[in-house]
Amino acid sequence: QVQLVQSGAEVKKPGASVKVSCKASGYTFTDYFMHWVRQAPGQGLEWMGWINPNSGGTNYAQTFQGRITMTRDTSISTAYMDLKRLRFDDTAVYYCARVFGGVGEFDYWGQGTLVTFSS
Amino acid sequence: QSVLTQPPSASGTPGQRVTISCSGSSSNIGSSYVYWYQQLPATAPKLLIYRNNQRPSGVPDRFSVSKSGTSASLAISGLRAEDEADYYCAAWDGSLSAWVFGGGTKLTVL
């Protein structure tokens, strides 16, 4: 069965970076794009971008341009989302989600990774 | 401020039919498929409806969608307690070259 398993919760300081992983299983990793979506506490969903695991090509939402990098390691079927220069308003649950192509349904989601801040 | 507009809340009693609206523009709903996601408390979103009105296996036909122009509506008939969740609409926005979501509607089953 398809599974997307994300790395554990992170506690960061403002200005730091966070790298979240998403390990895929149950399907051919390179056949589906991996998208990242975040959800601030009590808020809605915000799309961050995608990576094509086959080519490594990426498409980032304008909001995150310059601060975000998505990569993948096809040998271990894992996608990564790296967000730099963290701010307090980056507090959120970060989800990976599988899509057949850049534009299509997000049919499987990871369990989410909470990123919070220490003072 | 979400690009797609949804009412923040909706409610109904068991067995009732409720609808949740989603309003967008010509660059998103007006020119692409609409998708709906259900998020139960403290869980990841789950695909509910794709390509306007297709249901993944396991989603009951109590859930249906209508779309007209730049708006869409999710209808839930025969409301059940387990339908209590947050519901999000989504569409690809060709002008923004980005996925856009509604702000979500919290459905309460009274």
Image: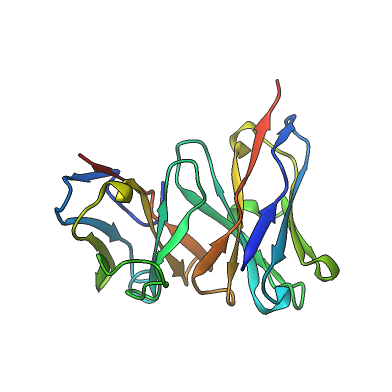
Residue A15 in view in this figure? yes
Which residue is drawn at the image coordinates 60% and 67% (left, top)? A98
| Image quarter of the C terminus of chain B | top left
Q: Residue at x 64, y 72 (%)?
A: A33
Give percent across and percent down for residue B67.
25, 72
What x and y, as percent, mark residue A30?
Answer: 72, 76
Q: Is residue B51 left or right of residue A30?
A: left
**What count of labels does the image hold?**
0
Determine the image quadrant of residue A86: top right
Tell me which residue sits at (81%, 70%) in the image: A74
Q: Is residue A116 above or below residue A93?
A: above
> Image height check: is B110 above or below A69?
above
Is residue A60 in sight in this rendering?
Answer: no
Task: Please tell me which residue lies in front, B74 or B3.
Answer: B74
Horizontal side of residue B102 vs A21, given as left or right: left
Q: Which corner quadrant of the image does residue B17 belong to?
A: bottom left
Across and down, in percent, residue B29 comes to: 35, 69
On screen, A91 above or below B69? above
Residue reaching furthest to the top: A119
Q: How is the image coloured?
A: rainbow
Residue shown at 58%/76% (left/top)? A100
**Left or right: A48 as drawn, with respect to A77:** left
The foreground one among B48 and A46 is: B48
